[in-house]
């Protein structure tokens, strides 16, 4: 629907900087958890579920793109 296009451009510089800092914090913690647990058997399940979720989202995006045209 295009309403999210340019979202980051509409943020103030300060809001954008704070959002990026928060995102970095989330990524760092996620990487730490990954590092600590990648030897655990459950990690394979996590990787599989992540792949499935990403694939579903990509299919939704593709379907929306095809619907718009």
Image (cartoon, rainbow, N blue to C red):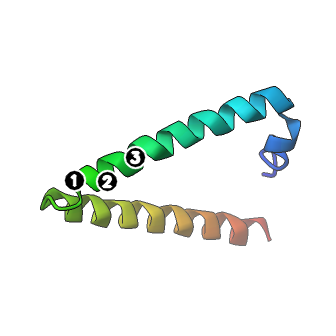
Q: Quadrant of the C terminus?
A: bottom right
How many residues crowd mark 3 within 10 Å: few (<14), some (14–19), many (20+)? few
Q: On screen, 35 above or below 52?
A: above
Residue matched to label 3: 30
Q: On screen, 29 above or below 59?
A: above
Q: In x, y percent, where is residue 62?
A: 63, 70
Secondary structure beneath label 1: helix
Secondary structure beneath label 3: helix
Residue sitting at the far left: 41
Total marks drawn?
A: 3
Q: Nearer the viewer, residue 55 or 60?
A: 55
How far apart, in angstroms, are the residues tagged by discs 3 and 2? 6 Å
| Label pair 1/3, CB-CB below 8 angstroms | no
| Label pair 2/1, CB-CB below 8 angstroms | yes
Q: In x, y percent, where is residue 24?
A: 56, 42
Residue matched to label 1: 37
| The quarter of the displayed image where residue 15 is located | top right
How far apart, in angstroms, are the residues tagged by discs 1 and 3? 11 Å
How far apart, in angstroms, are the residues tagged by discs 2 and 1? 5 Å
| Label pair 3/2, CB-CB below 8 angstroms | yes
Residue at 51% across, 37% down: 25
Q: Nearer the viewer, residue 43 or 56?
A: 43
Q: Nearer the viewer, residue 43 or 3?
A: 43
Q: Nearer the viewer, residue 62 or 38?
A: 38
Residue matched to label 2: 34
Residue at 40% across, 46% down: 30
How many residues crowd mark 2 within 10 Å: few (<14), some (14–19), many (20+)? some
Describe residue 51's horizontal placement relative to residue 40 as left or right. right
Describe residue 26's horizontal placement relative to residue 7 as left or right. left
Secondary structure beneath label 2: helix
Q: On screen, 67 above or below 5?
A: below
Q: In x, y percent, where is residue 12?
A: 85, 29
């Amino acid at each position: 629907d295009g309403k999210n296009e340019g979202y980051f451009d509409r943020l103030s510089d300060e809001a954008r900087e704070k959002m990026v800092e928060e995102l970095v914090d989330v990524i760092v913690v996620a990487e730490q958890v990954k590092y600590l647990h990648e030897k655990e058997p459950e990690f394979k399940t996590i990787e599989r579920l992540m792949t499935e979720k990403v694939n579903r989202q990509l299919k939704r995006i593709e379907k929306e793109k095809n619907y718009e045209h």
